[in-house]
Image: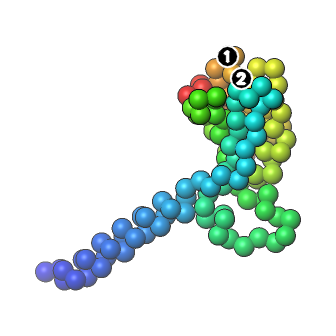
Amino acid sequence: MPNPRRLLLFFAAMVTTVILAEYLSRPVEQFRLHSPDGQYTAVISTPRLWQLLPRLPGQAGDKPGQVEMLDQHMQSLGRMPLSRVSLASDLEWIRFGARIRLVGAWNFRDGFYAYWNDDQTHMITQQLN
């Protein structure tokens, strides 16, 4: 018969691990970029785990993250991964959307966004949320 105390300790360790993993994976906002007309906002974030890891001076932008596009009502228009948050500084607001060189683009008029996969071998296209 299993030891009830060991089962309780195992269960407590599993719950603690799940809670910690969820906490460390939550995104933490780094900065926002607003479109010139104020209609859209790009929110750049990184997982909390990367906030806790030490970095050398000048390498803070080397951590991975994501960019999420929001409309004027703060509704998400999709998100795409960034291999480095510093890539977000290349965000350009274009006529019908926004783009980040070497990462991807949003087309607000036609209702989609597309970005390169991790290996840069093909584009992933999604409809706007």
**In which quadrant of the rendered image does the C terminus lie?**
top right
Tell me whether the residue at label 1 lies in contact with that at label 2, contact meaning CB atoms closer than 8 angstroms.
Answer: yes
Above or below: residue 16 compared with residue 93 = below
Instruction: Kindly identify the residue that appears in the image at 66 percent across and 65 percent down.
Output: 51
Residue 60 appears left or right of 51: right
Measured as percent of width and height from the top left, residue 9 is found at: 30, 79
| C-alpha separation, residue under disc 1 versus residue under disc 2 | 6 Å
Tell me the kind of residue under disc 1.
Asp
Residue 91: quadrant of the picture: top right
Residue 78: quadrant of the picture: top right
Tell me the kind of residue under disc 2.
Asn
Measured as percent of width and height from the top left, residue 21 is found at: 49, 64
Above or below: residue 70 compared with residue 88 = above
Instruction: Kindly identify the residue that appears in the image at 76 percent across and 40 percent down.
Output: 33
Q: Mark 1 sits on what residue? A: 110
Decide which of 31, 6 is in the foreground and name it.
31
Residue 98: quadrant of the picture: top right
Measured as percent of width and height from the top left, residue 62 is found at: 78, 59
Instruction: Kindly identify the residue that appears in the image at 19 percent across and 83 percent down.
Output: 3
Residue 43 appears left or right of 35: left
Residue 3 appears left or right of 72: left
Mark 2 secondary-structure assignment: strand
Decide which of 3, 129 is in the foreground and name it.
129
Q: Mark 2 sits on what residue? A: 107
